[in-house]
Image (cartoon, coloured by chain):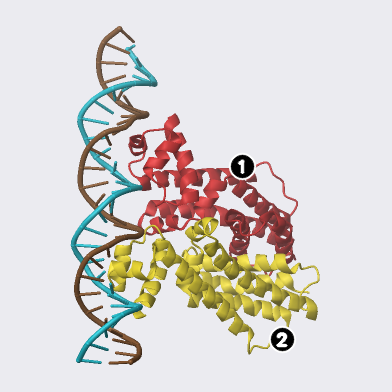
Chain colours: A red, B yellow, C cyan, D brown
Amino acid sequence: MKKKESILKVATFMFAHKGFADTSGQELARLTGVAEGTIFYHFKTKEGLLLAILEKTRDEIVDQFERFFENRPFKSGLEMTEEVISFYLYLAGLMEDKFLLLHRHFLYQFSESNPEFRGNLEDIYNCLVDIFEKAIVAGLEDGSISKEILPRKSALILFTMADGLVRFKNYNLYDAGALFNELMRACRRMLQA
Amino acid sequence: MKKKESILKVATFMFAHKGFADTSGQELARLTGVAEGTIFYHFKTKEGLLLAILEKTRDEIVDQFERFFENRPFKSGLEMTEEVISFYLYLAGLMEDKFLLLHRHFLYQFSESNPEFRGNLEDIYNCLVDIFEKAIVAGLEDGSISKEILPRKSALILFTMADGLVRFKNYNLYDAGALFNELMRACRRMLQA
DNA sequence: TGTGAAACTGAGTGCATACTCAGTTTTCCC
DNA sequence: GGGAAAACTGAGTATGCACTCAGTTTCACA
């Protein structure tokens, strides 16, 4: 069981950083310290390996957000929205390779022909956007968020904002940490009643 | 001269949609209707071909935004900001393949080792973010945008919002057109004095 | 029309790749 | 300890790839 997990871990890193096509079984085996055959013993194909990683990623993200909701009292919907964004950014740091992987185009190419990929990606995006939406709805109910706000659409916009920051960080385009405060202020101005 | 342009056009489409590694010289030659050798006659390597595409893309984007600024009177900085976002989204539709290409990770991998890639990408991002910033500064000067707004950082945030919408469209994750109005309202609420 | 240069061709080359398989080692339960 | 199943191995195979090159066609201009 140990080798299978090592392969998953190293492959996640390699797929995220080098891409799918540029990750070879040979190199993956060398870096993991197993024989190349072992990879194909556990995961029938390279695509199967990628799918296993995606499934694990979905489980982890869904699990993390479930735990985020337990044991946490929110003062207001607006504040909850801000904390959701914070948590999203925190998670993107914690699961850096996996979030980088989720930004890789090849996942979306596979999802066009393989419904298992599609399903996992949908689960992840629905989980993320639902949480933003829940927070906004809470804010609409307690009056901390303006009645003009449409929950689902605004949830998607917030999501793109948070995700854009993650992308800046991952691509080294800009010092993302320096943007954090301004992002939070922008959200507040955008939503506030 | 005709074949060289055809290769650039087809290669842009293929790199954007299939990725760099999954685009083979053989297939590219077949789809373009030239011999494989012709590709390597005009562009010494596959990487050289990609660089030529990136250079063309940069020229086109910079040119488009220069023309956007000519012959256009803006009522206020806030309105100009909104028009910049609109124009960005319009351009992403007009140059769909090229914007898709700019979202591909392999460009950023090459830019780590090849300064020519890096330079072109920087030119593009600077051009885009500068325009958002200029519009915000104009709004700060004429009082249509709140004095609390920091121009550079807010420009980056606006950029990620607009770019997020483009990504939704390109990845078919959500009907991006349906988000347009909400995005514009979100920007106004965020910036307004 | 002749000529040199530029554009173009496609079979050929060597190398990297995903995946297989026959055999070996480890694990685990009686 | 025995024996069966599961885990693991790595040399081997067929395929596809980027790129080359010696030769042919097209072009521009005298």
Query: Can residue B45 be spotted in the picture?
Result: yes
Image point 45% across, 37% down: which residue?
A31
Q: Residues within 10 Å of mark 1 (few under 14, many from 20)?
A: few
Name the quarter where the N terminus of chain A is drawn: top left
Residue A125, compared with residue B62, is above or below; it is: above
The three-letter amino acid code for the residue at tag 1 is Arg
Residue A155 placed where, x, y %? 61, 61
Residue A131 placed where, x, y %? 60, 54
Name the subunit of mark 2. B
Residue A70 placed where, x, y %? 64, 42
Residue B42, compared with residue C1, is above or below; it is: above
Which residue does the numbered mark 1 point to in the structure image? A67
Which residue does the numbered mark 2 point to in the structure image? B75
Query: Can residue B16 be spotted in the picture?
Result: no
The Cα atoms of the two marked residues, 1 and 2, are separated by 49 Å
Residue A111, compared with residue D12, is above or below; it is: below
A130 horizontally vs D22: left or right = right
